[in-house]
Amino acid sequence: MELWKDIPDFEGLYQASNLGNIRSLNHIRKNGTNQYIQKGKLLKFNKNPNGYLQVRLSKNGVAKTYRVNRLIALAFIDNPFNKKTVNHINGDKLDNNVKNLEWATHKEQTKHMHEVLGIPYADCSDLVKRRWNNGTLGA
C-alpha cells in the first residue's frame, strides 16, 4: 500500500511516498491578478550524471533540483545522528522504496560499497577517492 507524507520544508506543496514516488498537491497559482487551482500530479524524474533519480521542486518562485532518495528519506526516516547521506541498501540507485534507504555517513557509504556490494576502490567515483585519500570520508 502506498503511503504519502509531506516533504519537510514543502508541506502543502509536495509529498513523498514510501514506494519512492513524489507528487505535487493542489495549490493556488497566481497569474497577474487572476488566481486558479493548479491540480496536483505525480512528478516525473530524470537521472543525474551519477545515475540517481532527481526531481525539480519549487517554492515561492524558486526552483531547485533534489535527489529523490533524499526526499523520501527526509519524509520517512528519522535521522537522530544527523547523518549527511542516504544509502541505497541494495546498491540500486533507481530503487527509492523507503525499505531500501538508510541514512549514512560518507564512511559508512564507502564501507557498504566495498564490503556489501563488492565494489573495488578502482571503481569508486573521483569524489570518494579524493575523500578516501585525504582522510575526509567522515566519521
Image (cartoon, helix red, strand yellow):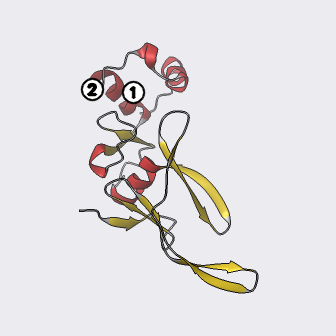
In which quadrant is the C terminus drawn? top left
Compared across the picture, whether 139 is left or right of 130 comes to: left
Instruction: Give the alpha-carbon distance from disc 1 to disc 2, as whole Å.
Output: 10 Å
Name the residue tied to disc 1. 110
Observer-nearest of 100 and 136: 100
For the point 30% across and 25% down, the residue is 117
* Helix, strand or loop under label 1: helix
- Cβ atoms at labels 1 and 2 below 8 Å apart: no
Residue located farthest toward the left when viewing the structure as drawn = 1
* Helix, strand or loop under label 2: helix
| Image depth: mark 1 or mark 2 in front | 2
Tell me where residue 115 sits by quadrant: top left
* Residue type beneath disc 2: Val
For the point 54% across and 26% down, the residue is 127
Compared across the picture, whether 139 is left or right of 2 comes to: right
Mark closer to the chain start, 1 or 2: 1
Residue 89: x %, y % from top left: 30, 37
Residue 124: x %, y % from top left: 46, 21
Residue 73: x %, y % from top left: 38, 52
Name the residue tied to disc 2. 116
For the point 51% across and 17% down, the residue is 133
Tell me where residue 119 sits by quadrant: top left
* Residue type beneath disc 1: Thr
Residue 66: x %, y % from top left: 53, 50
Compared to 48, does 29 lie above or below? below
